[in-house]
Image (spheres, helix red, strand yellow):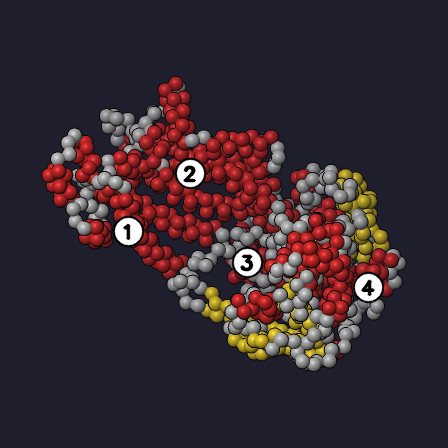
Amino acid sequence: MGEPLIDIRDLIVALPPGADRAHAVDGVSLTINPNEILCIVGESGSGKSLTAHAVMGLLPRGVTASGGQILFGGADLLRLPPSGIRKLRGRDIAMIFQDPMAALNPVVTIGRQITEQIRAHRAIPEKEALELAGGLLAEMGLADPKALLKSFPHQLSGGQRQRVMIAMALSLSPKLLIADEPTTALDVTTQAQILKLIKRIQTERAMSVLFITHDFGVVADMADRVAVMRHGRVVEEGAAAEVLGNPKHSYTRALIAAVPRGESALQPVAQDKPLLTVTELSKHFRRGGFFSGSAAVTAVDRVSLTLSRGETLGIVGESGSGKSTLARCVIRLLDPDAGEILFDGADIARMTPGALRPLRRRIQMVFQDPFSSLNPRQTVGEIVIAGPRAYGEDMKEARERAADILRLVGLNPETMNRFPHEFSGGQRQRIGLARALMLKPDILIADEPVSALDVTVQAQVLKLLDDVRQQMNLAMLFITHDMRVAAQVCHRVMVMRHGQVVESGPTGTVFAAPSSDYTRALLAAIPGRGKLAPV
Amino acid sequence: MNRLTYIGARLIKTVLITIAVVLLSFFLVRLAPGDTATVMAGQAGFADEAFMKSLRAEYGLDQPLPVQLWKYLSAVAQGDLGSSFVRRQPVVDVILERLPNTLLLNAFALLVAIAGGVAMGMMAARRPGSATDAAMTVLSMLFYAMPQFWLGMMAMLVFSVWLGWLPPFGLETMGADYTGLTRIGDIAVHMILPGVTLALYFMASYARLTRTAMIEVADQDFVKTARAKGISEGQVARRHILRNALVPLITFAGLQSAILVGGSVLVENVFSWPGVGTLAYEAVTTRDNPLLLGIFIVTAVLVSLFNLATDIAYSIADPRVELGR
C-alpha cells in the first residue's frame, strides 16, 4: 500500500473545562488510503464524530484539538491558519451530515446553496455554476434537476435532501468525503438507496470516504476497513471482513451482537378474545382556511386490526405511511373520520371526552423522541406520578408504586428527584415507559421508541419492552420503520403504505415468505443483511 | 392559497375590523362625561342653557344615540368622517394634512431602529459573553429603560440648546419658505431629533432580538454545512446566519409600525411635530369627538394594512411560510 491520503497521529481533542471528561478523543491514530471506505464505528460519546470534525477544522466552539497531527498532502491540518484550512474545505475534503432536514439553509434555494460552494473555490459565473449543479443533481439520481435548483429545502423529502447534500459535497471532486451518520435520520429504504449511492460514487470517482456510523449492519454494507471507537480511543482496527468475521475486542463483539438480524424468534400468541378490535378505520386531513377550498389527504385508509392480551403487533411503514396517525387515532389523540375502535367491548371511536376519560388510563403511549417528550422543568418523580394523581391516587401510595416501577424499568428509585436532562437517551426512554406503566395500562402503544437510540441501547430497550409486556400481560402496538426492530419484539406484523395495509401476518411468515413486493423491498433494505454472522 | 386571494381575503377582514373599530370608538368617546358643547361653553366663559342647546342642535348632539350612530356610519361609508367641531374643517382634510408628516417621521424612526439595532445585535452575537456583548447589553438596557419624553427633552437640551447643532422643534424653519432641495434638507435636519428619540427604544429591542436569533441560528446544522463549503466567516455570518435571523425581526417590525402610528403622541408633542400624534392630543383636550373618531379609524385601517404587509414580507423572507395557514 502506498502513501495514505490522510494520516491522523495521536489526535487529542480537549473538551471545555467543566465537561464530564477532559478529552473526547484521546490519542487516536488512523490512516485513510486513497480509494477506500473507512468506517469508524462507535456509540454516542465515543469521539467518532469529533475525530471527523477535527479533520475538517470544524470542531464546535470551546472544543479544541490539543495534540497530535492530521497530515494531508504534506501539511498538518491542525497547524494550518484558518484561511489555509478554508481553502481545503469543500474543495479537497467535503462533508455530509446526519440530519439532512437541518443541514440545508431553509431560506436559500437549492441551486444557490450548491453554486455558493463551487464559486467559493472557482472563479466562474453563476450561470455556469448552476449548469454544473444541475448535472450533479442528475448524477445523484434526482429527477428534474432544473426545477430542483429553484426549490427550497422544505419542498424536498429527507432522501432528496441528502442527495442534494452529496451533490454539493462532490461539486469540486474532493479527494475525501466525510459522511457523519448520513443515513441515521432516514427511513430504512431511503437509507439503502443513499448507501448504494455513496458506494457507487466512491467507486466511480475512486475517492476516499470516511464513514461514521453506530450501526454494524451499515458497516457490513459499506466498509473496506473498520475502526471501532470507544471512550475516545480506537479499540480495534482492521479490514472489514476481518473485524466482522473475527472480532477480537469484546466491545466489538458486543456491538456486532446488538445489531438485530431481522429474524423472528417469537411465536404468535393464541388469539382468544381480542382486547382491541379496529374495523375499517379512516382518517383524512384537510388543509385550508376561512376563504380557501379544502383538499383532503387520506392518512389512514380503512385499516382493520385486532390485538390480544400479551401480544405485540408491529405496524411497519415508512414516513407518511399513516402508521403514527393510526396510533394517534387508537389512543384518541386524533378523532377518526370513519370506522370502529372496540376496546374491551366499547366503541371508543366516537366516545365523548367525558365518557372516554376513565378509559384513557388503560391505553398508554411511549413516544419517539426521548428528548422532547419529557417536560424539562419537572423531576422524574413528578413526571411519573402526575398520571395516577390525576386519577385521584393517594400521594404516598403513588410514590411507593413509582419506586417499584422505576426499578422495573431498570432505574434507581433515587432518580426521582432529578431532571430529565441529567439522563441519556436510553434512560429517558425508560422514564417515558415508567410514566406509561404507572397508569396500569392494558394496552401500550410504542411509537418508534428506539429509532433515536444507538444500536446497543436499542437492544436493551427492546428487551425491556418485551419483559414488561410479559410481566404485566400487556397488549402492545409497536410502530416502527425498521423491519429488524419489528422482528425482535413483534408476534405479528402489519405492513402499511400510503395509509393502507399491504400485508399482515405472523412475523416469521411475513419475513420468510413475504407476499407483497413492498415488503420484499423493505426486507432487502435491511443494512448488512446476510453479511453478519448469526448470533 | 395564492397570494392574490389571500390579499383579497385580508382586505375584506380589514373592512370588518374597521366597522368594529368605528362602533367601539363611537360608544367609547361618549362614555366620558360632558360633550363638545360643554367644552365650548367652558371656553367661551359662560354656560347659557339656550346657547348649549343651539350648539347641540347644530352638531346633531340632541338626537337619539342610534340616530347619531346611523348618520355617522352612513357618512363614513361614503368616506366622509364629518367635520371637526373645533377647527370647522372636514376631518378627512385635517387628518390628510398631518398624516404624511407622521408617516415620514415613523418611517425614518423604523429605519434607524432596524439599522442600529441589527448592527448592535450582530456585534454582540459575534462573541457571546465578551466585553462588546456586555457593552451592547448595557447600552440597549439604557435605551429601553429611559422614558421617551425625558430622552427627547434631554436630546433637545444637549443638541439644540447647548451645542446648537440641530433645530429643537417643528417640521421646518418657520417663515423661511424654502423650496425644493433646500426644503427637503431643512425637514431632514428637523427630523433627526424626534426620529432618533423614537427609534432608540425600538433599537434596543432589535439589538436583543438580533443577538438572540443570531446565536440560536449559529448553532444550527446548516451553518456547519456553510463552513464546510470553505466560504469565509463573514460570508457565513451574512449569507446564512443573519439571513435566517432576520426572519423573526419582520414580526417585530410589523408590530413596531403599528405601535408607531398611534404611539408617537408623546414624542410628536415634545418636539411639536405637526403629525397625527399632536392632532390626537388636541382632539382629546378639546373634546373634538369627530376628529378623534376619524383618527381612530384612520389608525385602525393603517395598522391592519401594516399587518398585511408584514405577513406578505414574512412569506417572501421565509419560503416555508404559506399565506393563510
Amino acid on which disc 3 is placed: His
> Which-is-in-front pick, marks 3 and 1?
1
Crowd around label 2: few <14 · some 14–19 · many ≥20 (10 Å): some
> What is the spatial separation of the Cα atoms under label 1 and label 4, in whole angstroms?
75 Å
Residue under the image location 73 percent in, 68 percent down:
A472
Q: The residue tagged with tag 1: helix, strand or loop?
A: helix
Crowd around label 1: few <14 · some 14–19 · many ≥20 (10 Å): some
- Disc sitting over residue A154 in the figure: 3
- Disc sitting over residue A257 in the figure: 4
Q: The residue tagged with tag 4: helix, strand or loop?
A: helix
Q: Position of residue A208 (x, y in %)?
A: 74, 55
> What is the spatial separation of the Cα atoms under label 3 and label 1, in whole angstroms?
44 Å
Amino acid on which disc 1 is placed: Leu
Q: Of label 3 and label 4, which has the lower sequence position?
A: 3
Crowd around label 3: few <14 · some 14–19 · many ≥20 (10 Å): some
Is A215 situated above or below A174? below
**Discs 3 and 4 carry the same chain letter:** yes
> What is the spatial separation of the Cα atoms under label 3 and label 2, in whole angstroms?
31 Å
Q: Position of residue A466 (x, y in %)?
A: 75, 68
| Residue carrying label 2 | B111
Q: Are marks 2 and 1 in contact (CB under 8 Å)?
A: no
Q: The residue tagged with tag 3: helix, strand or loop?
A: helix
Q: The residue tagged with tag 2: helix, strand or loop?
A: helix
> Which-is-in-front pick, marks 3 and 4?
4
* Subunit under mark 2: B
